[in-house]
């Protein structure tokens, strides 16, 4: 598989700081290409959400630089998924301890994906998402939120969830959950586009609008990928989304 990647993050129209943190790293090894992409949506007063998300991003950047070369010698994405999960649990404890010590509340979501050749592993906490885009939009991660749980239980409809005041209530958050249980997925890479995004990106646009702009047919090169993603970010802002907005777009071919 060949991967092309772009990333955009925007402070949005209402917040004083951008508490989202975005990372991607793209390289080659003897078996082909390797690509890591991560989005963290931080939460907390002042800049503390930014600190939480940046702390997690920095740890995963270090892992890519120092640990990944050894993992590639005897590749097992299930093992990597387990190690990422343990890293997040360790970061969860450290952020909780820091927050208690400083009498503050802070935390971050996490959605991270590692593509290696024709497989990928995703580890996920909270309500940032990973999608696959072909002729339709397919959500690959499950939101760890109150409303997503209620929809799955059948006690709330998707339409009701759009206006529910508990829309942003997370069941899992790195830095704020006593017990953290990340979701881990290992799958084959499908041709098309993969998209990681914070919740600010997706609230004010429809699935149809995402597919129209980010259909792989329209993503002819990196410039097209960037401009199409930027178009959707500006559309979200025009519709008065008040959160930070972040997206990583990956074309697999």
Image (spheres, rainbow, N blue to C red):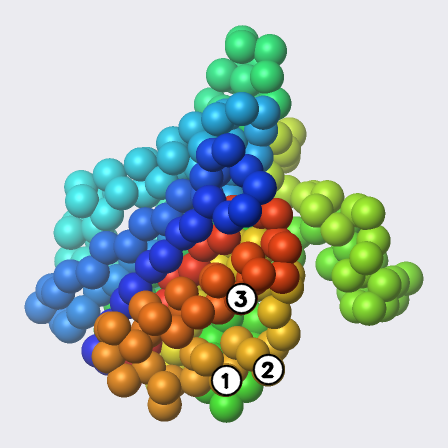
The residue furthest left is 30
Residue 2: image location, x then y, percent: 21, 78
Residue 46: image location, x then y, percent: 54, 24
Q: Tell me the residue at 38%/35% (across/down).
A: 54
Quadrant housing residue 160 = bottom right
**Circle 1 SS class:** helix
Q: Is residue 213 visible?
A: yes
Question: How far separated are the C-alphas under marks 3 and 1?
Answer: 13 Å
94 is higher (above) or lower (below) than 88: above
Q: Is residue 122 visible?
A: no
Q: Earlier in the sequence, mark 2 or mark 3?
A: 2
* Label 3 Cα neighbours within 10 Å, binned few <14 / some 14-19 / many ≥20: some
37 is higher (above) or lower (below) than 41: below
Q: Tell me the residue at 74%/58% (across/down).
A: 148
- The answer to whether marks 2 and 3 mark residues whose Cβ atoms lie closer than 8 Å is no
Residue 28: image location, x then y, percent: 12, 65
**Circle 2 SS class:** helix
Q: Which residue is mark 2?
A: 208
115 is higher (above) or lower (below) than 73: below
Q: Which residue is mark 3?
A: 235
Q: Tell me the residue at 63%/33% (across/down).
A: 177
Query: 61 or 104: nearer the eye?
Result: 104
Q: Tell me the residue at 39%/78% (across/down).
A: 193
Q: Which residue is mark 1?
A: 212
Q: Earlier in the sequence, mark 3 or mark 1?
A: 1
Quadrant housing residue 163 = bottom right
Residue 139: image location, x then y, percent: 57, 71
Q: How many marks?
A: 3
- The answer to whether marks 1 and 2 mark residues whose Cβ atoms lie closer than 8 Å is yes
Question: How far separated are the C-alphas under marks 2 and 3?
Answer: 14 Å
């Amino acid at each position: 598989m060949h991967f092309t990647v772009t990333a955009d993050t925007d402070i949005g129209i209402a917040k004083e700081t951008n508490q989202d943190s975005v990372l991607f790293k793209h390289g080659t090894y003897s078996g082909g290409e390797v690509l890591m992409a991560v989005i963290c949506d931080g939460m907390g007063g002042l800049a503390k959400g930014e600190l939480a998300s940046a702390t997690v991003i920095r740890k995963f950047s270090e892992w890519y630089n120092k640990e990944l070369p050894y993992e590639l010698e005897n590749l097992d994405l299930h093992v990597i998924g387990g190690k990422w999960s343990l890293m997040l649990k360790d970061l969860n404890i450290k952020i909780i301890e820091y927050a208690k010590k400083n009498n503050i509340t802070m935390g971050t979501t996490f959605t991270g994906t590692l593509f290696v050749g024709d497989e990928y592993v995703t580890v996920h906490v909270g309500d940032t998402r990973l999608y696959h885009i072909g002729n339709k939009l397919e959500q690959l991660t499950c939101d760890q939120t109150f409303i997503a749980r209620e929809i799955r239980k059948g006690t709330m409809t998707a339409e009701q969830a759009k206006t529910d005041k508990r829309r942003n209530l997370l069941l899992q958050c790195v830095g704020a959950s006593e017990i953290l249980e990340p979701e881990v997925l290992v799958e084959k890479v499908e041709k098309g586009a993969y998209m990681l995004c914070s919740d600010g990106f997706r609230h004010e646009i429809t699935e149809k609008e995402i597919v129209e702009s980010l259909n792989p047919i329209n993503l002819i090169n990196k410039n097209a990928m960037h401009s199409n993603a930027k178009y959707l970010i500006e559309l979200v802002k025009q519709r008065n989304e008040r959160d930070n907005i972040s997206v990583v777009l990956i074309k697999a071919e």
